[in-house]
Image: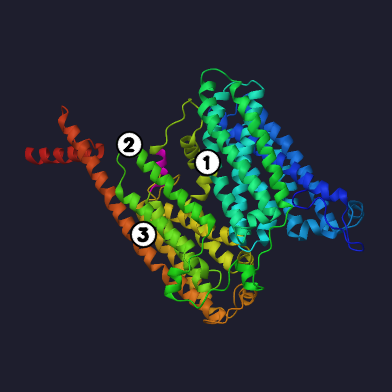
Amino acid sequence: MVLGGAATPRIIPGLPDEGTLTRWMLPLSKLAMDVSGVLTVGLLAVAAAFLPSDKGLLGRPAQSYVKGASWSALAWAVAAAVALVFSLSETLGAPVGEILAGNELTSYASQVPQGIALTLVVLFAVAIALFARGAITAGAAAGLLVFALVTLLPPALTGHSSSAPNHGLATTSVGMHLLFLALWVGGLAATCVHALRGQAQIDVAAARFSRMALWCFIGVGLSGVAAGASRLATIGDLFTSAYGLLLMAKVAAFAVLGYLGWRHRGRTLPRLSAGEPHAFLRLALGEVMLMGATMGVGVALSRTAPPPVNTPVDRAFELLGYLLPPPLSLGNLFTLWWFDLFFAVLAAALAGLYGAGVVRLARRGDKWPVGRTVSWGIGVVILVLSTQSGIARYAPVLFSVHMTEHMILSMLVPIFFVLGAPVTLALRALRPAVRRGDRGPREWITVILHSRVMRFVSHPAIATAIFVVSTFALYFTPLFAAAMEEHLGHIAMTTHFLLSGTLFFWVIIGVDPAPHKLPHAGRLLLLMVTMPFHAFFGIALMSMGTVLAGAYYDQLGRTWGASSLSDQQTGGGIAWGFGEIPTLIVLLALGFQWWRDDERVARRADRRADAAAAKPGGGTGDAELDAYNDYLAKLNRRDRSR
């Protein structure tokens, strides 16, 4: 704060001043909020993933950490409530005493984005504290861990990231940075607590944390580079601005953390396996202290304004993060690419993990069908093209391009994904847990597949309803306009398209094991019943006389191309006619699967018949067929006797 100037601001007489108490208590309360939130994540991570469980039940140490997470979550809620009060004090430029005496706090907590974010943290943290009191299974601890990670996001996504020139990149990178950092810092801190308590299985917990820390280190580094790039106009800003200097200090601390992690993995883990439980603390405690200092730099960074960037005074630039593109053309779609960090990371993870599974099977001598690998690769390529190319740049500008992206992500990419059989590949490539009854990645996949939630959402009727009804619910309610206004809304919307399509086509042509298995005739009937709804949706769009999210499109100030209403009608035509291509692909895949299934049944019957014929007394191996043959033989003998 001293380096960035936030500790000693220039106070102009006559202008509102929140006072010294607010200037220091606000960042301190935010630091307390960060530390308690990260500690909650770490305790839940140790309980859910680092310590072995017994057939899904947490051991006594793990249960104690879940209860500890309930107390840290309560402290998290208190710190967020304090930060809420001091944030309003800073916003209004009034001492905290005046804030508490007035009625502005309610409006701030329910109407202003920063206030809403802190209010959500208070509510979610209290919920975590309550539910953690009775959690005794690894599944419950994992669910609370996911909930805690989500609770970390709202305050960070309403800070500098939402006002950065490239706010899309800034928002996504800050969210990823925070999640990876919380798992890394919290996981190490909680593992240190486990070591200090002298509990058993510290070697197992440290080894599992070390594997996770490597991925967290990579994620923190990549997201940090993206976050810095989104706020700095030039490289020189790193050396000439307080924000750049703080950023360099954080990078230096990050590099030291990487070295310590590498040293810890190479030297400490073997000593733990050799029976030296205190070896972990010698290096890890110093790493925790350095992580705490890094978090302090991060808080100071959030209180320091980024260097000014000369951005055009343009409403379209504020909404999109880039200037309005030129008129739509085929060349612009292929040349005006737009980097979306979220979907770029998603595509890289999907391609990398699938490729790693195929390579592991090949090294083990197992075969994996080439067609499945090709199908998965095609899906990843189409995903990249639809989220990174000119389609992604024009989708927020033209409804017709947005609808094209929607159709591709919900009706084309999922087909190739489900034909790639990723779950089957994971179950074959991943090794079972070393300890009997414990849960490794392979066991978690099996538990999720057999969970009640998965059985519910994968039911053919539910999956179809999600696929069809959600489309009408999105576009014919205010949800569409709200999603188009925010980058996170756009990510949520496109992610829903991808997931709902994957769930539906998994039911129709999925190769992976599923809780519900329809006969092939039932799948064909379900496909024929569902696809016309997209045509009805397209016709409804073409018949509308008003523009969906009209206020949003008016703010863009587009002067080229067709009117918004005409473009919307074009989008309706795309929704109406696009379904023919996916339907043809699904019919071909379904027909091939049906033929292969009949062929397998015939081969099994032949093998049974051959095996039965080789036994004394003969037979076919099919009880009903044998009984029918006996009946015919009796009739034949009776006819001959006559």
Residue linked to disc 1: 215
Residue 226 position, x and y percent, is: 57, 54
Q: Which amino acid, mark 3?
A: Val
Point 69% across, 32% down: residue: 67
Label 2 crowd (10 A; few <14 / some 14-19 / many >=20): few
In the rendered structure, does residue 424 fall within the stretch colored magenta? Answer: yes
In the rendered structure, does residue 365 fall within the stretch colored magenta? Answer: no
Q: Is residue 501 left or right of residue 34?
A: left
Residue linked to disc 3: 586
Tell me the element at label 3: helix
Figure quadrant of residue 426:
top left
Point 62% across, 51% down: residue: 175
Figure quadrant of residue 557:
bottom right
Q: Nearer the viewer, mark 2 or mark 3?
A: 2
State whether residue 412 is above or below residue 513. below
Q: CA distance from mark 1 to mark 2?
A: 23 Å
State whether residue 430 is above or below residue 150. above
Tally of marks: 3
Q: Is residue 629 left or right of residue 344?
A: left
Tell me the element at label 2: helix
Write the start and end of the magenta stretch as one range: 421-427
Label 3 crowd (10 A; few <14 / some 14-19 / many >=20): many
